[in-house]
Amino acid sequence: MAYDDDNAIVVWPEYFDKKRSRAEGRRLPIELCVDEPSLDIIAKGAMILDLEYKIFEDMAYPANWAAKSGCVRIERGKMPKTTLLNELAKILVSNS
């Protein structure tokens, strides 16, 4: 499947950050989160899932607009976003 920017899912490192609360942007349970997730680790997870991606380093998470942590846009594939986040989280935890 080819990468299509219109159908790509935006994935922020804040979704996987163990130090954040749900109100601060964490989307997953603490057990599926890591300390200081990076764009490279998220991109590696997308690569392991055989999904195409693009890294945007100068983007800021809307709830934390002052910190430009960047984001990764990942092709949708056949998974809903919640399933994709859970699969990425399992890869991040196993590789950290």
Image: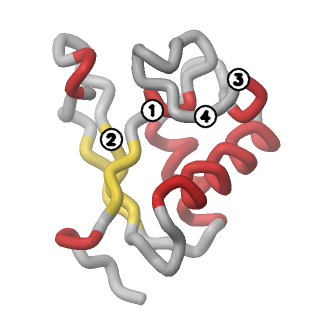
Marks 1, 3: nearer the viewer = 3
Residue marked by disc 4: 28
Q: Using the image as rendered, state which of residue 86 and residue 23 is in the foreground.
A: 23
Marks 2, 4: nearer the viewer = 4
Q: Which callout, 2 or 1, points at the residue further toward the start of the chain?
A: 1
Helix or strand or loop: what does disc 3 sit on? helix
The label on residue 82 is none
Marks 2, 3: nearer the viewer = 3
The label on residue 30 is 3
Label pair 2/1, CB-CB below 8 angstroms: yes
State the residue at coordinates (32%, 25%): 69
In space, the residues marked 1 and 3 are separated at their CA atoms by: 14 Å
Is residue 78 rendered to the left or right of residue 66?
right
Residue marked by disc 1: 13
Tell me the amino acid under the disc marked 2.
Cys
Helix or strand or loop: what does disc 1 sit on? helix
Q: Which callout, 2 or 3, points at the residue further toward the start of the chain?
A: 3
In space, the residues marked 2 and 1 are separated at their CA atoms by: 7 Å
Q: Which callout, 1 or 4, points at the residue further toward the start of the chain?
A: 1
In space, the residues marked 1 and 4 are separated at their CA atoms by: 12 Å
Tell me if residue 25 comes above or below residue 49 in the rendering. Answer: above
